[in-house]
Amino acid sequence: MDLDFHYGTIYVLSRWVKFGSGNANLIATASQMVDDNYDDNPFSDAEEEKNIALGIHVRYSCQNIWGNITGKGNPEVWIPFHFLPGLQGDDTDSKLVCKKNSALSKKLRARLLDTTLDNADFAFRLGVGLHVYADTWAHQEFAGINTTINKVQSLIFSNHGSVIEKVLDEIVGSSSIISKIMDQINPLGHASAVHCPDMPYLWWKSGGHFIDGRKNWDEFMEASEDIFRLLQQVSCEPVTGLSDRQRELLMSAFKDIQSENIEERYDEWIRRIRANEFEIEDFDDNDAEASYSEGTIRDDLTFRGQFYNEINDHFNWVKTELESKDIYILKSQPIY
């Protein structure tokens, strides 16, 4: 999932369950920050040293292109924060495949349900955890390691409402160097499915994964329903689930905002939020100016510390769960 879901949808769901605009922004910002929390200067430890001096225990939860190329810390990033293992199958690679509604994802849900509003870190606990939980829908059937399980064949996708279909060969070229490399390597995560799993308006299918096709908008709606119920319980609201009107508003956003450009989809979500097209009951001035900014967390020493506390806490929780199943793949030390 991308910025439009991790910030936009999470913001709307948080407001619908009566979190105030300030807390909704913190929850949604922490959710998206999981994707933006990467080492933007892998050749220097200066930034990390500054944080350490401030008592902030840095751990990265995403990789930029240099991180992926070097592979440094890949398991510590992709397994706990983006491809929560389903722990199903007979071998380690199979157990590391992400599954929606897996036993471990249900444990994560229960962990988030234990969040209490008297915990000063609650917005960050929810934001980080909901990012990982939502991704179990988007990234299901792929693993956060380099493995043959991630290989995709005969990839076909189309926009909702469009008869135009594209196949993988048209993207990379059947005789291109990229195609030949992809045939030789074991892909990381859903790299061989390009960005298909994360775009809400896309229908797609692939050999070995979704041979009957997958409607992303249905998967994203299912995730939204589950997250909404979770947030209702945490915010001490009656657990009713989404209303027909709320589902209609979300489905319109998932299906009708069609752009491969993440920023364009996000911009339309923000426009709809600010215009109160999601019909937030206690809409206020903060909603009218809602937007995602890394600076909300990075520029506030307290928020930065709270965010990293939850990043580390979540990592350690996943590590403990994996080791209980004799999977010792995650390292304890932060990756610098």
Image (cartoon, rainbow, N blue to C red):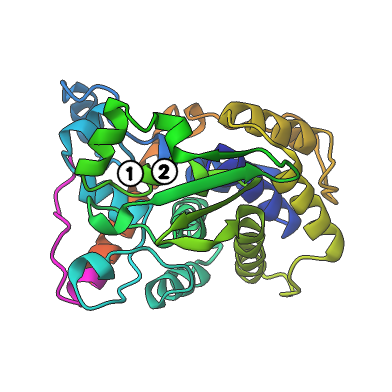
**Amino acid type shown at disc 1:** Ser
User: Which image quarter is the C terminus in?
Assistant: top left
Give the residue pinned by disc 1.
61
* Residue at x 68% of width, y 28% of height: 267
Q: Which image quarter: residue 277? A: top right
**Residue 229 shown left or right of residue 16 in the figure:** left
Element at badge 2? helix
**Residue 73 shown left or right of residue 95 in the figure:** left
Residue 160 in picture, x, y percent from top left: 71, 46
* Residue at x 32% of width, y 54% of height: 150
Cβ atoms under marks 1 and 2 closer than 8 Å: yes
Give the residue pinned by disc 2.
34
Q: Which image quarter: residue 217? A: bottom right
Q: Is residue 109 visible?
A: yes
The label number, if any, that marks residue 133 in the structure image: none
Q: Nearer the viewer, residue 260 or 262?
A: 260
237 is higher (above) or lower (below) than 122: below
* Residue at x 63% of width, y 43% of height: 158
**In the image, farthest residue toward the front:** 175
Q: Is residue 54 visible?
A: no
Based on the picture, tell me whether residue 74 belongs to the magenta stretch.
no
**Amino acid type shown at disc 2:** Val
Q: Nearer the viewer, residue 129 or 2?
A: 2
**Residue 175 shown left or right of residue 265 in the figure:** left
Residue 3 in picture, x, y percent from top left: 55, 38
* Residue at x 61% of width, y 68% of height: 226
The magenta segment: 321-336
